[in-house]
Image (cartoon, rainbow, N blue to C red):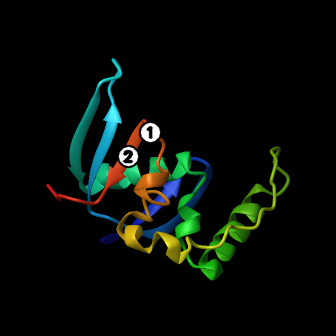
Amino acid sequence: METAEEGCLSIPEIYGDVERRAHIVVEALDRDGQPYRTAVAGYKARAIQHEIDHLDGILFLDHLSAVKRGLLLAKWKKSRKGKSGYLKEVTPEPAASSECASHSLVLLISQCLHCVPWWVKASTSSPL
């Protein structure tokens, strides 16, 4: 695991330290629909986990403590004051239940490997 600062175009100019796996293995389909598997590390691994989070409806802010998330969202809302756009207040879902405890190594990537869409799977096995 490694911690690094992340941001997102969904929430411009807001950054926070997020802990993610340093090495991941991704299973996906290529342009021709053929399955492939690749191991990635570092920045590329972080970017893939960040984007898979988006597919699961998760923003990097959801990985932060409630206090830190609240401070950053307040800062962002203040910076947006008077600007066009739509802000919707939502209540975050509770953390993953213990029923997926056997998959705790991949919770930052998805709920668990059994819950990942068929077309993209990620796991933390076999670092580069």
Residue at (51% x, 72% y) in the render: 99
Q: Residue furthest left?
A: 128
Q: Nearer the viewer, residue 20 or 32?
A: 32
Q: Is residue 91 above or below residue 10?
A: below
Point 57% across, 79% down: residue: 65
Q: Residues within 10 Å of mark 2 (few under 14, many from 20)?
A: many
**Res 88 quadrant in image:** bottom right
- Identify which amino acid the numbered label 2 is placed on: Lys
Mark 1 and 2 residues: CB-CB less than 8 Å, in contact? Answer: no
Q: Secondary structure at mark 1?
A: loop
Q: Mark 1 vs mark 2: give the one in front.
A: 1
- Left or right of 124? Residue 114 is right
What element does badge 2 sit on?
strand
Using the numbered discs, state the Cα–Cα distance from disc 1 to disc 2 in whole angstroms.
7 Å
Label 1 sits on residue: 118
- The count of marks equals 2
Is 6 drawn above or below residue 51 in the view shown? below
Q: Which mark is residue 121?
A: 2
Q: Is residue 87 left or right of 103 when viewed as pictured?
A: right
Residue 100: horizontal and vertical position, in percent?
47, 69
Residue 79 in which image quadrant: bottom right
| Type of amino acid under label 1 | Trp
Q: Quadrant of residue 128?
A: bottom left
Quarter of the rendering occupied by the N terminus = bottom left
